[in-house]
Image: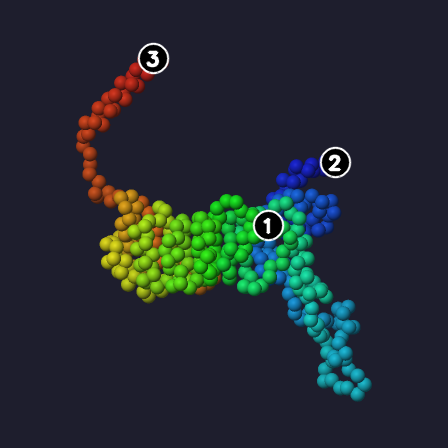
Amino acid sequence: MTSELTYPSLRCIWEYMEPNKRIHITSRSPQLQRIDKSIPLHIDYLRLAEGIIQINDVEYETCYGNILVTPDDERYKDMSEKLKLTPGDIQGEPRIDWQIEGTHLGFRNGPNYFERWHTEKPYVISKRQACLLFEGRSQIIANLLHTTDQPHEILRLPVGFKVHTSVIRCEFQDFPYILPIVKSSFILNEIETSVRYEDTLDHLQLRNAKRLIINRIEVDEYMDQLETLTNKYVGFKDCYLEADEIVRVVRHWVRHGKPYGTVWEIGFPVEDYLSLLEDLKKEFNGKLAPFDKPVDKRIIPAPGYLVIPLDLKYELIVYGINWKIQGEKMSYVRIESVPIQLDVSEVVEIKSVPSVVSFMTIVRKVLDLWNWMRF
């Protein structure tokens, strides 16, 4: 006979169980419901939108639309009067099914989709679903918090809802709007955001994030702020910069500096890439260096990559790269500060250095004395 699990052992198993399985099991066990809320919920991917909550691969969706009613449906007898035949009416073919309007609560897991029909309004069901999933939980931890709601749409969430996360991705809005539900006292690892307002680029959380990805922006309106960014990585997703704007970024980088190891990836038309390299080479006294063999197939064909001197220890390298994003090919210019590569041919052989010889003689005498004292 097996003994029952103790609370500490149950807590350890329960905390790291796949969250959708945990939610499914808990909904059928009153005993587990009493302790479930006190145990942290770990989620790899959490997506929020109006009427949608996605936890990892499972999507909970509430929407309003047409529902097909077939003869085997118990609601079939409630067919609208306008669809029924009355004495004297004729119809070419009998109606087999009909549609009513209502609220769907759908559950999608990959190719599988299940739905329930409700008579209440979608926003009421959305709120109730969010409360069932999240209300009263002691801690919700998500590796990635992703929002895909449009401006002016409403996220229906329970009171006190907070997410511990280090990665925020806001598809269509400036990220500060989501911060009221983010419980984070440390620097965010990554922020992906649209930029529609000037204050966004000055926000402390954005400035301190290790990685920044900008997916929508009117570049010419915000260049004064963009060129001063000091994040370790800055990427532009679905955004292109003009050649003069990239030159301006490099100019600020050379004059004012950025942290060593900083990387920028900027969308740029592939047909103008060689012309950009030439402009940068002329202004910053750069030189072309050959690529190592074998060359990464994603690198845009060119005579080499551009090297721009920064200081005695670091230099900028500039080259083009092709990415495929959701099946669509995009070209980028990658700018990266790297340690200066020492050319072996320039190393001078040191034949004899008296000071080094003298130092080694002293070391040997100290070691001899130490060995003598030990014995």
Position of residue 270 relative to residue 202, above or below, is below
Which amino acid lies under the numbered mark 1 shown in the image of this protein? Lys
Along the viewing direction, whichever of 16 and 120 lies nearer the viewer: 120
Position of residue 19 relative to residue 303, above or below, is above
Residue 371 visible in rendering: yes
Q: Give the CA separation, mark 1 to mark 3.
A: 65 Å
Task: Check disc 1 and report its element: helix, strand or loop.
Answer: loop
Looking at the image, is mark 1 or mark 2 nearer the viewer? 1
What residue is shown at x 40% (from left), y 60% (from top)? 222
Looking at the image, is mark 1 or mark 3 nearer the viewer? 1
Which amino acid lies under the numbered mark 3 shown in the image of this protein? Met
Neighbourhood count class around disc 1 (C-alpha, 10 Å): few under 14, some 14–19, many 20 upward: many
What residue is shown at x 37% (from left), y 62% (from top)? 241
Earlier sequence position, callout 3 versus callout 2? 2
Q: Give the residue at mark 2.
A: 1
Along the viewing direction, whichever of 187 and 290 lies nearer the viewer: 187
Q: Give the residue at mark 3.
A: 373
Q: How many labels does the image show?
A: 3
**Residue sitting farthest toward the right:** 87
Q: Where is residue 20 in the image (x, y as percent from the top left)?
A: 63, 52
Task: Check disc 2 and report its element: helix, strand or loop.
Answer: loop
Neighbourhood count class around disc 2 (C-alpha, 10 Å): few under 14, some 14–19, many 20 upward: few
Q: Which mark is residue 162?
A: 1
Which amino acid lies under the numbered mark 2 shown in the image of this protein? Met
Earlier sequence position, callout 1 versus callout 2? 2
Quadrant of the rendered image containing residue 278: bottom left
Q: Where is residue 369 in the image (x, y as percent from the top left)?
A: 30, 15
What residue is shown at x 79% (from left), y 88% (from top)? 88
Circles 3, 2 touching at the beta carbon (< 8 Å): no
Residue 142 visible in rendering: no
Q: Where is residue 152 in the image (x, y as percent from the top left)?
A: 56, 64
Along the viewing direction, whichever of 299 and 66 lies nearer the viewer: 66
